[in-house]
Amino acid sequence: MLTKRIIPCLDIKNGRTVKGINFLDLRDAGDPVELAKFYSENGADELVFLDISATEERRKTLADLVLKVAETINIPFTVGGGISSVEDVEILLNNGADKVSINSSAVKNPQLINDLASRFGSQCIVVAIDAKQIDGNWKVHLVGGKVPTELDLFEWAKEVEQRGAGEILFTSMNNDGTKNGFANEALSKLSTGLNIPIIASGGAGTMQHFTDAFVEGKADAALAASVFHFKEITISDLKNELQTQGIPVRIIT
Amino acid sequence: MKIVIINYGAGNIQSIQFALKRLGVEAILTDSETEIRNADKVIFPGVGEASSAMQKLKASGLDKVIPTLKQPVLGICLGMQLLCNSSEEGNTKGLGVFDVDVIRFSNEVKVPQIGWNQIQNLKSELFQNIAENEFMYLVHSYYVPLCEGAIATSDYGIQYTSALQKGNFYGLQFHPEKSSTAGEQILKNFLEL
């Protein structure tokens, strides 16, 4: 049986992890490779690296990092942040990334999804969608959720699927950072309305929130950052709890 | 021992090379017929779309070479699918080593299947020290139905073949190079065949 995936997300700036990492037992908590290795050995099903650098050298720094991560870990990983062309994707995949995630560039140029899917296959193209519920309507936002658009979340998600995305990473801006749980209603609508996997993101605070994302939200995978980075929840405890709740997960022995 | 990974421009071969390196083996990436024929073990990878991958194989003449290899050959993911008779993806004729046709999952399940699924009914020395129901990482939209050569099966809405064998040819639908320590054990078993 296919299991539900638990995905820690690492924010990367200039080749280093940023935003609240509290791993006292790591030699260097800022080293993404070391952190990736820790998670891969402790039951993470996948990892996402989100590059938030804004420097000229970002492409090269990210490509180097991907190579080091691929050399070290034995689970799949996705790379996102600032990817806007077939060439960008080619470099990252050739360096060992399993999937790439595109966001703003897909909204600005939807044809990019078709181009990437036909060139590299749908299986490695994740489209990330940040959306916020305003007056009952879910609107897609860009630039890390800062810039609103007129796009409706569900219409955009449908279009993304039709253009060949293999997976959608949905972040609810209303829930992100609140630790009050995932946006389960919207998740469920996405998951039942589309035929590609949906990754839930934004709002994880407790183990129950993950259960809810899978049961109520019908998500295929759940992504979180701070609850893992600050060891508020360990992946092994989480998976044991999910299994107790009857949710299929990969338990490593 | 000389291990080659067939390099025909389709897919993430870096990861396989790294996985072998973690096992202490330096594999050679090559599209040279001589190098491939002289290898002790051959890995035939592949990620992406079947018809364009097949075109690349034909362009390099490797479509004639691969089916005649005598040493152990391991097809991974699309590599395994290309070893079959045909694929529904792009109506592609395959290399015909495995006498079975690759078809698409029905829309009753999410397509592609992405994630960790279990392998069952293990029937090969390739799975030595691998437990029944071990988890493997899969990413695919097309699959091999249950067939005579199956050496592992999985369940995704239906039961299907997740690994198969015919003589010196082995095929894995999952990615051993991305399937944690259990996947590495399978690669190690292949190296020791």
Image (spheres, rainbow, N blue to C red):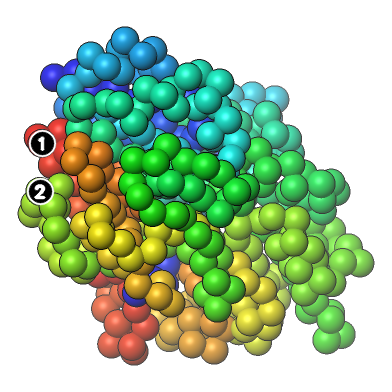
Query: Pointer 2 indicates a residue of which chain?
Result: B
Note whether B8 is above or below B109 in the view shown: above
Residue at the location (62% across, 77% down)? A191
A98 sits to left or right of B75: right
Q: Are marks 2 and 1 in contact (CB under 8 Å)?
A: yes
- The disc at residue B87 is none
Question: How would you rate the neighbour count of disc 1 (Cα within 10 Å): few for under 14, some for 14-19, many for 20 or more?
Answer: few
Please state the total of marks drawn on the protein image: 2
Residue denoted by label 2: B125
Secondary structure at badge 1 equals loop
Instruction: Count residues near mark 2 (Cα–Cα under 10 Å), then give few for <14, some for 14-19, many for 20+.
Output: some
> Is A72 situated above or below B121?
above
Quarter of the picture containing the N terminus of chain B is top left
Q: Which mark is residue B193?
A: 1
The residue located at (29%, 22%) in the rendering is B4
Question: Which one is in front, A161 or A81?
Answer: A161
User: In which quarter of the view is residue B130 placed?
Assistant: bottom left
Quadrant including the C terminus of chain B: top left
